[in-house]
Image: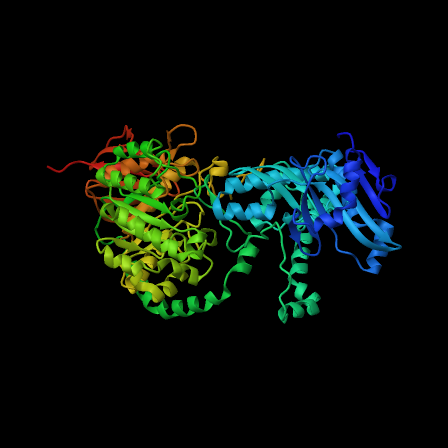
Amino acid sequence: MTHPPRYTPLTDLRLPGYEGELLERYATNTGVNWLAGLQEQLQHSDSDLLYRQRNRVYRLDDPLEPTLESVCIKAFKQPDTLRSAIYRRKGSKAQRAHAYSAHLFANGADVAEPIGYMERWEGSQLIESYLITRYIAQSTDLYSEMTYLLRERPSAEDFITLLRFTADAIRTMHDSGFLHGDLGPQNILMQRTGLANWAHPAFIDLNRGQLIPDPTLRQRARDMERMKIPSHFRHIFFHLYFQDNGIPAEFQRWAKRYHNRFLLHQRSRKWRHPVRTLKRLFATTPQQQRLAVSTGQPSPRNSWLWDAQSGQPSVMLQVKDRKRERNKADLWPMATASLKAAWPVYQRYQALRKTAYQTPVSMGHRLGVCVEIDESFEQQIQQLKQTLGLPVFVRLYFHLSQGQPGQSRSPDQNEPPGKTWLDHASDAIRRLAEAGHEVSIGLVQSREAVLQPDRWQTFMSEALAAVHPYVHCVEIGHAINRVKWGLWNLEDINTLSHGTTDLKARYPNLIFLGPAVNDFEFQYYPPLLEAASSTVDALSNHLYVDRRGAPENEQSGFSTLDKCLLAKALADHYHKQGFYITEVNWPLQGTGEYSPLAGAYQPKGKVENALHVSEENSAAYMVRYALIALCSGTTERIWWWRLAHPGFGLIDNLKGWRERPGWPALVHFHTLMAKETFRGREEKDGAIWWHFDRISLVYSLTGSQITLGKEVARVTDLTGHALSAIPGDKLNLDGNPLYLHKVAIA
């Protein structure tokens, strides 16, 4: 605690008719004369009007140091007779705000320096009332800074930095024994000192506050009921308030109750004040323009942040809020289009099911990997020399092409500054193609792509103009059924495909993939393909196993095979050139905030989600998944997401460059399958066998033992290591596929 500031009562100064107090160093002739003419000064052209709603806020030169400092004057609206009587008893807004400000200032909490307050009474009627504080130059508020980040720097890391800065300031205020009473983001000021750095927080509008030593959890929760932050990040904000620890259950219970009450209060405003609402609705004369510092609350629907650590947009809203924002009108076109296609698709599905694994499939170059154009690109392209001809998939991000921050930087930091991110990406794609890789790309949207469709059209045109000579497939849009990727309804999704028909005509050699549905939500295909079937040549999906363990597991009664069969049936029904899986992986154990399940933040002591798997299991799942999808004849390509990433990559590039088991497993599969043809699948001896011309793969989901036959020349494991086994030996099987190399026939 610092020494409390010392004040001089105005009754001791030559200001007849005025009450209040003034910081001691201002109790000079200069200061007194300045106060005496304050009302006139506020009408003068030298005063800056900063805020005009119910009350007014002005900036004036400091009377003691007019060239160096400024002061902030809040002129309160004259209250009615009843409120004046109440203020006379409990203190006016200016008096209370000044007292609380002085308390916070003395306790080292964050507030503008309290200089004084001044008011004039006529009996029990308050006539004039002013609060005087230090002016914080170039200040902004929390709402405005959230809006700035969402529009100009959509980075989850930066957003959390802002919330941490705010949470620390609020915690200090509460620990000093003060509850604000009107703690909304518009009442938290700060200065931006860098692109994503802030300093000098200051709480304003303190007159509703209370001095309460050591507030309880319930009182703290109630004081933060007005903190309107996108709900997922509001939850993170509370973790930050408790120094990255768990949120106490009592606090969480009250915080939810109070915040819901506050939201209901806001939504019911027009019903609680019908006369005021009607006056605004039918106003015939223009009202005086309101002036405010804050930009107001950012739209939850248009909030979008990139989480660089997990390589995807962050979830912004919790489930109930997402459901409230989604358009229920989409249910009807989804239902009608799905019902219309149901019977012919079902018939085709059943026909495909009968022929699954019965047809030879050429296996060369069907399993590939996603490559990211980032600071590790040079290491990635060197790594790919182990897998000549491996298909690669590259994402081109709309938000990075607009100069916004993200997870990726230029692949070559020595390039001249005039080159754009798209220039660097097109150079990288050219190099991949020249190295012998079949390159496909995905054009990935942000929320701004929907809000500014002309810029999205320009991005698509410029991207394809730059890379089309080197590209095989192009996927328009990404995870179109996930709101965190910026799409809320079918209308938003269709916005992305506008202009695609022209691009297809311009680049007839490219295969256009889509609609890029995420997971097993195939109900999106019928309405989208009915509305814009001509925009895609083949279906694509990011087909996870609902992140429920092994690829053989079922989701709603559908295994990976069943899902691929249904996708192929849909593709055939809508006359498309097959089915492509452009993203799949499993979240890895021990990857913390880099996991795709982390949600941009991990508090201390967070128990890891049980859906994570070991690196060894992920490698085995990759090969088994590929066998199921490719050998069934339903899937044209699979691209594993992705080559290098701390949370799910085949390479862990967090601290160095470490190959996980998945990388040698992919190398081994790619090398052996390059010239192989699938011939058949069988289940015997408690094992699953996949037969090709020169090899067979075998594994067991339940554990079993087999005896090697005379046709086996050698055995290699999942990652390519030779096993010391000869014909007649017994092999114990588990879920890791083994390669049985056949004796060459002369």
Q: How is the image coloured?
A: rainbow
Q: Can residue 542 be seen in this view?
A: yes
- Quadrant for residue 380, please give it: top left
- Quadrant for residue 614, please give it: top left
Question: Where residue 407 sits: x, y (%)?
Answer: 43, 39
Q: Which residue is drawn at 77% across and 36% down?
A: 26
Question: Where residue 189 sits: x, y (%)?
Answer: 64, 43
> Would residue 341 be found to the left or right of residue 489 on screen?
left
Residue most extreme to the right: 123
- In the image, residue 474 above or below residue 174: below
- In the image, residue 16 above or below residue 488: above
Give the position of the C terminus as an image quadrant.
top left
Q: Which residue is drawn at 39% across and 35% down?
A: 616
- Quadrant for residue 577, please give it: bottom left
- Along the line of sight, the residue nearer the viewer: 700 or 216: 216
Question: Where residue 16 sits: x, y (%)?
Answer: 86, 46
> Would residue 39 be found to the left or right of residue 469 on screen?
right
- In the image, residue 522 above or below residue 388: below
Give the position of the N terminus as an image quadrant.
top right
- In the image, residue 448 above or below residue 409: below
Q: Residue at x 80, y 36 (%)?
A: 29
- Along the line of sight, the residue nearer the viewer: 122 or 730: 122
- Along the line of sight, the residue nearer the viewer: 742 or 404: 404
Question: Where residue 13 sits: x, y (%)?
Answer: 85, 39
Q: Is residue 436 visible?
A: no
Q: Which residue is drawn at 45% across and 61% down?
A: 489
- Along the line of sight, the residue nearer the viewer: 26 or 679: 26
Residue most extreme to the left: 746
Q: How many labels does the image show?
A: 0
